[in-house]
Amino acid sequence: KPAKKDSSVQVVYTADAGVGYAYGPYGGSASHNSIPLKYGDAEGGRHVWDAILRDPETVNDDSTIMNGDISYARGWPWTWELFAKETEDIFTPAPVMTTYGNHEFDYGKNPFYLCQGGDSGGEAGIPTAIRFNFESETRPWYHLRQGPIHFIAMSSEQSISDQSFWLRTEVFPNVNRTLTPWVIAFFHRPYHM
């Protein structure tokens, strides 16, 4: 539902909340599922989605931001299906904005470099780009306006210089602070690493 310029916008913001279970130092968390799960075994990620659904304000959400490490599929395609099933009630009523995390697209300018056996399990961003309608899996940054906010989705997994050029030439010249006094940029990892 589009918001008006002078209205508020309510956004669900989450990251690193995919499905999965890990043993060892990550035991009990949804992170870094290095082994495939039995279908229906959601463990840690399920707790995040259950909490969001229990929140009575969830029905008023205008958007959702999934800021990387979305499903933790890491090369297991059926994990994307399990993730979609678990999050359907949250993501269906409101638009979803996503960014790549290292578990969708391994760090580097070339999406196919370092992907085999790395953090993304060889996915190279392709399942994420297709499921969330990115114009390009190698240029997954975008910007959009919703009510009083201009959202800027960036990728911590691609070239910073390419995105800096995009910000200077395409985004900032089109940000109207009278119409959108709020500018919110998001990306998976901090850029100071």
Image (tube, rainbow, N blue to C red):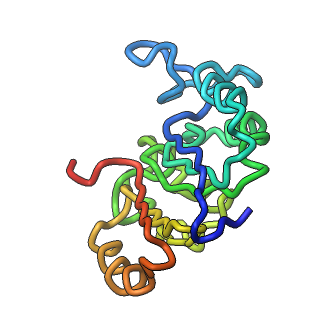
Find the residue positioned furthest to the left.
192
Q: Nearer the viewer, residue 63 or 142?
A: 63
Residue at point 42% right, 66% down?
A: 183
Left or right of 151? Residue 25 is left
For the N terminus, give its image quadrant: bottom right
Q: Nearer the viewer, residue 186 or 131?
A: 186
Q: Nearer the viewer, residue 24 or 61?
A: 61
* Above or below for 128 versus 55: below
Count the marks: how many? 0
Left or right of 118? Residue 58 is right
* Above or below for 129 versus 75: below
The answer to whether any part of residue 51 appears in the image is yes
Rendering quarter of residue 38:
top right
Q: Position of residue 29 (x, y in %)?
A: 50, 20
Residue at point 51% right, 78% down?
A: 179
Residue at point 60% right, 28% down?
A: 48
Rendering quarter of residue 56:
top right
Residue at point 36% right, 77% down?
A: 167
Q: Position of residue 112 (x, y in %)?
A: 45, 60
Q: Nearer the viewer, residue 88 or 3?
A: 3
Find the residue positioned furthest to the front.
6
The answer to whether any part of residue 140 appears in the image is no
Q: Position of residue 99 (x, y in %)?
A: 50, 56
Q: Position of residue 177 (x, y in %)?
A: 42, 77
* Above or below for 187 versus 150: above
